[in-house]
Image (spheres, helix red, strand yellow):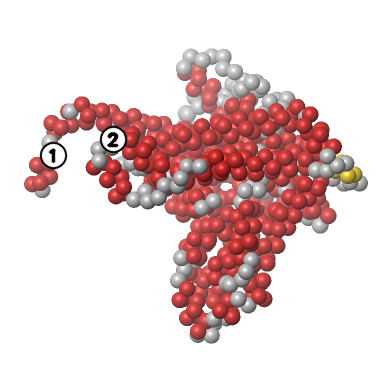
Amino acid sequence: MERATVTEKPVISLLPGQIGKKIGMFIFYTVLIILAVFQILPLIWLLFFSLKNNQEVFNTPLFALPSPPRWENYVKVWVEGNIGRYFFNSVWITTLSVIFTVLLASFATFAITRMHWKLKHVVLGLFMVGLMIPVHSTLIPLFSFFMKMKLVDHPLSVILTNIGFNLPLTIMVLLGFYYSLPRELEESAIMDGCSVHRMFFQIILPMTSPVIVTTAIINMIYNWNEFVFVNTFISSDQYKTLTVGIQNFIGQYTTDWGAIGATLMISILPILLAFFFLSDRIVEGITAGAIKG
Amino acid sequence: MNNMMSDKKVIALYILPPLLLIVALIYIPIIMTGYYSLTQWDGIGQMKFIGLDNYKELIKDGMFWKSVYHSFLLAVFSVISLLGYLAVSLVLSGKVKGANLLRKIYLIPMLLSSVAIGQLWLRIYHPSNGMLNYFLSFLGIENPPNWLADPSIVLYAIFIPIIWQYAGFYILIYYAALKSIPPSIIEAAIIDGANPLQLAYKIKVPLISGVIKVTIVLAVVGSLKYFDLIYVMTDGGPNGASEVMASYMYHKAFRSFNFGYGSTVAFSLLFICMIVTWLIRKLTNSSEEVQY
């Protein structure tokens, strides 16, 4: 306590260097906060106009609170605009894609990091190079392949491509975690007469659950937002996901701002919720995926 | 022990399903794109092998080169914006209160779908009712240009939401890299009398040069293959003023049903991405890695 009072010398804060530092910090904070406002203001505006009718959108200030909030916009697009169907398509296609991506990526990472075989570095290389391939340079053959297989306008085409194109990133995030697992673990498991499959499913998979959660969240976001594959392979309303569904829906209702806003809000809400509860995991996953590349 | 973990059947069981998927969905299609690029084909009828004719046409195709130019312009913009992100991250990783919350806020746009972002920004640029012109009117600018209809502006108008979308991503990467610098190095530099600017420019930036290289490759290649917001917002228009390589390929293949020529554009896109990646790696490798 005494020492603290001794070191606190208010005079020093008046020295030019200290004032400069304070002004500097003030400028820094201002810039950082302006950037934060720039990043979220469009979304706040979106929330506001999703709760207004056209008359209010055109005649009241942009950031006037919607009063009363017109929740009927949401009900309307959910019921009339097919948004409910697109939403459920997104949910189940995303769910299946995430489960299989994470499972198959765990298979591959397990085989590459724990088993002994000659070509494993070549195979790992194939997965890593896959990260850099532009999706568009594979799109035409994929389309004609799915056409031959009668998978065009079938959700399986989207699920398969979702899995294939997210495997490399998922494996990359898993690798670091697998390398850090102690080898004694599987040695003792095998000593106890455990088979490889039991070891994988009962020991390795549970042990990697933190990183599995991380990769599952990242995959969920990427699959939920996937646009090009659905737009190219799926043509009937029955199988469209939210991204393509709302693109078409909005094309028809270009003048109803409230309906458009409500549609967009519904499409981003699951992501915003996931972000609200799991932001640390999302940050961790995106950082791990980017830097190791 | 080793026998079990090198059992070929077990290994095949684990590696083949994922391996076959990426070979079937990524590698075989690339080879097929290369082959299709030498044909004349509408996707349904008879395929006709025409050698390098598509490439000869491509070289003379003004619209293709325009789209290449636009893609490279986006790449230049993205790399310049990296400087801004680096500056922000340097500030953010200092002793800033709320840094963790701020970097999460910055990240939000990156998590949203391109369709949602594109549709939202179409409204932001809306001539009579958009957020941008609303704010501009406060600054006394009463006759703003029609952002997305003016061919000389539209491309830059789309660059803004692309940068908006990815800002948080790069800030996140730089922030994580800067935070992983051992504090002892920073302390030693401060004791030696380094001011904050020197500390940033001479100590921190060189220490994360490896990460900076990665982000340059990500930004350039990501820009060259960029498609989503262009397609959602303007579809390459007006009159090709915002066409990029990927959207040009998409139009040729899935609008004009010219699968052969579309493949030529797609293969050139892949080739350009590979060359540029290789060039950046080569150019940035001359400086030696900093060890700590």
Residue A239's disc number: none
x and y percentages locating residue A264 in the rendered image: 59, 40
x and y percentages locating residue A30 in the rendered image: 36, 31
Q: Is residue B241 left or right of residue B98?
A: right
- For label 1, the residue is A8
Q: Quadrant of residue B162?
A: top right
Label 2 element class: loop
Residue A185 visible in the current orientation: yes
Residue name at image x 83 percent, y 43 percent: B38
Label 1 element class: loop
x and y percentages locating residue B238 in the rendered image: 70, 25
x and y percentages locating residue A242 in the rendered image: 65, 46
Q: Is residue A47 left or right of residue B40?
A: left
Closer to the camera, B150 or A88?
Answer: B150
Q: Amino acid at mark 1?
A: Glu
Residue B195's disc number: 2
